[in-house]
């Protein structure tokens, strides 16, 4: 089976690349070649997917059993893909987001039939528009789309925080500085290790029975945000100093962070994985968060290049902490 990944070097796509190669898939990456993958065995096509003519020329007359776009975010991106890959692939997988599901949710258990409504976050709204375009193309012209909706998926150097991101928040924990959580930290959430996601995802590659279908792929382990932050801190050998602030107040102070909270992480959310397990019979998430996050934290702390502090993010945390004390 010959598979093309557009992108392919991110946290999720790297794990899927490694597993695809292990399964004997002929894997091709199409990207600008700016990031060197941590694995070998992939053939590389150098092109900028945002440049239609550049990509068309680079692809020449190649055809694929499956094309996966890991970096399509707005309608214009999928429209380019439709033009490039119609008649060139037997399956096109669009990487959407689990944040497209109804917010606020009417039911904390999410299935693939949960309505796609997100009035808070432009990122999710664009993903919904992309899905609509692709499903319409499948229904009217037979474009062979499969939609995959990851939720918060971590691994390697990605430490999954709710308020803020990157090493900056871990550094605050290490320095015993306060970190911020939305609400009271009790809302439910699901964290998925990238190696677990890859097991479900690779089972969809080249599968003719999943054309026209959508899937989320997550762990079945349910935690609250307090537990998540404590597990991260304990992996670094410290106790977190957590302060709390309502999501709406965070949104007033920093609209970008607020959008990702109100459009996703604020609400208690768990996922029914019955559908992916029905189509990929051997899928099961096996990495508990306390083990997976310890591996990630240890990796970050062992590599200086990942220990970069964002001064603006640190200052934002200080402002949020100050607000929490008022």
Image: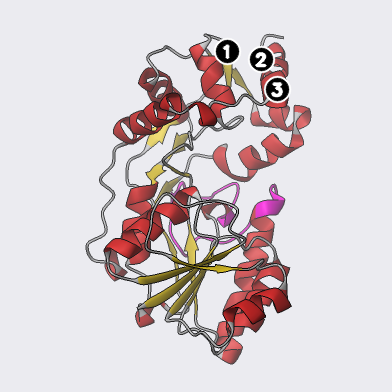
Name the element at disc 1: loop
Observer-side mark, 3 or 2, equals 3
Q: Earlier in the sequence, mark 3 or mark 1?
A: 1
Q: Label 2: which residue?
A: 321
Q: How are the colours assigned in the image?
A: secondary structure
Where in the figure is residue 114, as x and y percent of width and height?
50, 60
Q: Which corner quadrant of the image does residue 56 belong to?
A: bottom right
220 and 93: which is toward the camera: 93
Q: Which residue is depicted at the point 55% across and 51% down?
A: 35
Q: Which residue is depicted at the point 60% across and 69% down?
A: 131
Observer-side mark, 3 or 1, equals 3
Q: Label 1: which residue?
A: 178
Where in the figure is residue 234, as x and y percent of width and height?
37, 18
Q: Label 3: which residue?
A: 311
Magenta-highlighted residues = 100-123
Q: Dots 3 and 2: beta carbons under 8 Å?
A: no
Q: Is residue 118 magenta?
A: yes
Name the element at disc 2: helix
């Amino acid at each position: 089976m010959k598979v093309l990944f557009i992108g392919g070097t991110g946290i999720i796509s790297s794990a899927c690349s490694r597993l695809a190669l292990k399964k004997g898939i002929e894997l091709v990456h199409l990207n600008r070649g700016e990031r060197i993958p941590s694995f070998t065995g992939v053939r590389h096509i150098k092109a900028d997917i945002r440049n239609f003519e550049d990509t068309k020329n680079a692809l020449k007359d190649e055809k694929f059993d499956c094309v996966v776009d890991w970096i399509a975010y707005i309608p214009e991106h999928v429209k380019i893909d439709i033009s490039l890959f119609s008649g060139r692939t037997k399956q096109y997988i669009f990487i959407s987001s689990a944040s497209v599901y109804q917010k606020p949710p009417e039911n904390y258990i999410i299935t693939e039939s949960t309505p796609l409504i997100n009035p808070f976050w432009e990122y999710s709204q664009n993903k919904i528009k992309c899905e609509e375009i692709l499903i319409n193309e499948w229904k009217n012209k037979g474009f062979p789309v499969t939609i995959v909706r990851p939720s918060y998926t971590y691994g390697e150097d990605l430490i999954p925080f709710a308020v803020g991101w990157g090493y900056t928040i871990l550094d605050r924990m290490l320095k015993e500085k306060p970190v911020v959580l939305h609400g009271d930290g009790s809302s439910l959430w699901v964290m998925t290790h990238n190696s677990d996601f890859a097991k479900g995802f690779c089972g969809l590659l080249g599968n003719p029975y999943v054309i026209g279908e959508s899937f989320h792929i997550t762990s079945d382990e349910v935690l609250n945000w307090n537990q998540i932050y404590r597990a991260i801190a304990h992996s670094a050998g410290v106790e977190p100093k957590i302060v709390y602030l309502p999501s709406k107040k965070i949104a007033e102070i920093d609209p970008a962070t607020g959008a990702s909270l109100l459009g996703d992480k604020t609400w208690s959310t768990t996922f029914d994985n019955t559908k992916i397990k029905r189509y990929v019979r051997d899928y099961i998430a096996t990495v508990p968060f306390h083990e997976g996050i310890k591996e990630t934290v240890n990796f970050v702390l062992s590599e200086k290049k990942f220990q970069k502090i964002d001064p603006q993010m640190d200052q934002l945390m200080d402002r949020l902490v100050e607000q929490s004390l008022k």
